[in-house]
């Protein structure tokens, strides 16, 4: 790049393992020149990269360390769906994760599904203030064949997770945990007396 070229903005991650050459020229009246180094927002551990300067066959370098801004609002970091495969008609649990605790008042993350006839999610999940995650329910519907559906979360960025909905009726909830009582004959004889042969 030379002075007058269109500016190029790229995060360090996109430049990893590559060399970017920026040419700056000094006139005869100056012995130094200044230039700006742009950075992208980061979360978690500090990162950075080396900046090299070459003139007259001599090369010098300096490492630019980029740390997260402790006062910056949190970022949407990831999302999970558990379990990743359910039978149609049952539910799964989704969880969104932030890079740092939500501020007072919380943060609203928008949710969407790629196929409303297979799985639905609430339009918004709220991460309470001081928390880094929040759960939501993924409701599924009966399908004829196993179908993959994508759940997407929107905040400062877009993150997706996949869920497979399988065919078959969900397990019945009737009589769960109960043991059927054996049939016992009932004596309807006269005088209310019970024969000795009945248990």
Image (cartoon, grey):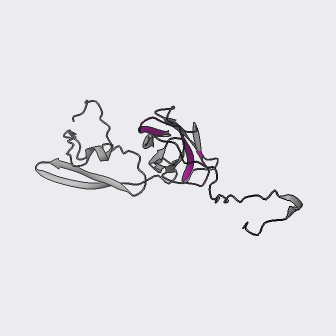
Apparent side of residue 170 relative to residue 147 in the rendered image (left or right):
right
- Is 75 magenta? The answer is no
Residue 102 or residue 195, whichever sits in front: 195
| Left or right of 57, for residue 113 | right
Q: Identify the image quadrant of the N terminus.
A: top left
Along the line of sight, the residue nearer the viewer: 46 or 152: 152
Query: Residue at position x 20%, y 42% from top?
Result: 21
> 24 above or below 129?
above
Front in this rendered view, residue 100 or 170:
170
- Residue 20 locus on image (x, y percent): 21, 43
Tell me the residue at 30%/47% (across/down): 13
- At a point 86% along the width and 62% down the height, the residue shown is 192
Residue at the left extreme, as displayed: 57
Q: Position of residue 132 (x, y in %)?
A: 54, 54
Look at the image and tell me in which quarter the C terminus lies.
bottom right
User: In the rendered image, is residue 33 in sight?
Assistant: no
Q: What residue range appears in magenta?
A: 126-152
Q: Is residue 133 magenta?
A: yes
Q: Is residue 41 visible?
A: yes
Q: Is residue 192 above or below residue 92?
A: below
Residue at the extreme right of the image, as rendered:
191
| Along the line of sight, the residue nearer the viewer: 143 or 9 | 143
Q: Residue at x 22, y 47 (%)?
A: 31
Quadrant housing residue 157: top left
Question: Which percent across, then down, holds residue 197?
Answer: 73, 68
């Amino acid at each position: 790049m030379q002075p007058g070229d269109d500016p190029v903005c790229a995060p360090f991650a996109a430049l990893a393992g590559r060399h970017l050459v920026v040419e700056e020229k000094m006139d005869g009246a100056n012995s130094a020149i200044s230039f700006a180094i742009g950075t992208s927002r980061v979360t978690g551990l500090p990162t950075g990269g080396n900046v090299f300067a070459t003139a007259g066959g001599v090369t010098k370098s300096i490492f630019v360390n980029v740390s997260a801004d402790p006062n910056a609002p949190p970022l949407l970091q990831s999302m999970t769906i558990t379990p990743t495969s359910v039978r149609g008609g049952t539910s799964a649990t989704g969880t969104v994760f932030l890079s740092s605790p939500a501020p007072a008042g919380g943060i609203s993350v928008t949710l969407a599904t790629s196929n409303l006839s297979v799985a639905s999610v609430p339009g918004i999940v709220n991460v309470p203030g001081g928390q880094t995650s929040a759960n939501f329910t993924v409701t599924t519907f009966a399908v004829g064949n196993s179908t993959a559906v994508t759940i997407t979360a929107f905040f400062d960025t877009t993150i997706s997770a996949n869920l497979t909905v399988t065919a078959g009726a969900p397990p019945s909830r009737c009589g769960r945990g109960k043991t059927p009582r054996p049939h016992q004959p009932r004596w309807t004889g006269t005088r209310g007396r019970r024969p000795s042969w009945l248990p």
